[in-house]
Amino acid sequence: GFQEVNVAMGGTLHPEIRELPGRMNHRMPPDGTLDEVFALRHAVQFTKGIPPSVGDVDRMYDVAQYRKRGDALCREIYGNVYEKMMATLSDVSPDLAAWMIVEGYGKTLSREGIDTCTREVCIVAMLTVLGRQQQLVSHVRGALRVGATLEELRAVEHAITERYGVGTSKRLLELIHLQECRLADQGG
């Protein structure tokens, strides 16, 4: 599923990544007994401490910084409904609201490596496939707020329809159509 989203968003895939130097073949053999199919493919080594690729530990656990960037990203995605959404969530569980900002938006969704727009389009794809209708509405709007186009969302819908059928992608198609109607009503 994610491979299709990657290609739909203009990405590329190496057709035989296991053939590249330094890469391992993690695929399960097509035939064989259950023991052969699920056998270990390579050794795994553990190293004590934090891997060097993680970087500065103090920066990693700067909760105030995570809260600041999580709040900024969440505001960007939710727009004018941010305050109401956070108030509602805080009424239900203040701890969950704080966790969502720090852990969800601050540590996870705002980390480096992928831009916000691409990440939101991927979230739209995942929520569509998982059938998370209420979250899907918010993240379709959020994707458009951070720069995604209706064409990109249509490409995601098309990839999901091809892979999982129209029943899975139906709500996303409805939301795209709703956004198209809103644009037409605004004269754009």
Image: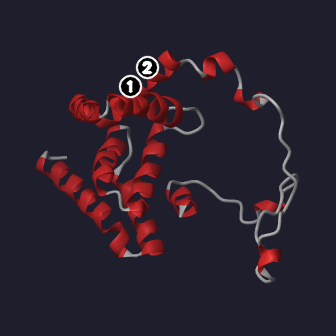
* Above or below 70: residue 6: below
Query: Where does the image place residue 157, in percent across and percent down from the top left?
Result: 39, 64
Q: Residue under circle 2?
A: 68
Residue under the point 78% across and 75% down: 37
Callout 1 crowding tier (Cα within 10 Å): few <14, some 14–19, many ≥20: some
| Kind of residue at disc 2 | Lys
Residue under the point 83% across and 41% down: 46
Q: Nearer the viewer, residue 179 or 89?
A: 89
Residue under the point 69% across and 19% down: 56
- What colour scheme does the image use? secondary structure
Residue 29 seen: no
Query: Where does the image place residue 96, in percent across and percent down from the top left?
Result: 37, 34
Quarter location, residue 180: bottom left
Q: Residue under circle 1?
A: 71
For residue 2, side relative to residue 179 (left or right)? right
For residue 7, side relative to residue 101 (left or right)? right
| Kind of residue at disc 1 | Asp
For residue 167, side relative to residue 12 (left or right)? left
Query: Where does the image place residue 149, in percent across and percent down from the top left?
Result: 36, 49
Residue 120 seen: yes
Callout 2 crowding tier (Cα within 10 Å): few <14, some 14–19, many ≥20: some
Gap between marks 1 and 2 measured at Cα: 5 Å
Residue under the point 32% across and 49% down: 135
Q: Determine whether label 1 and label 2 are within 8 Å by CB.
A: yes
Quarter location, residue 125: bottom left
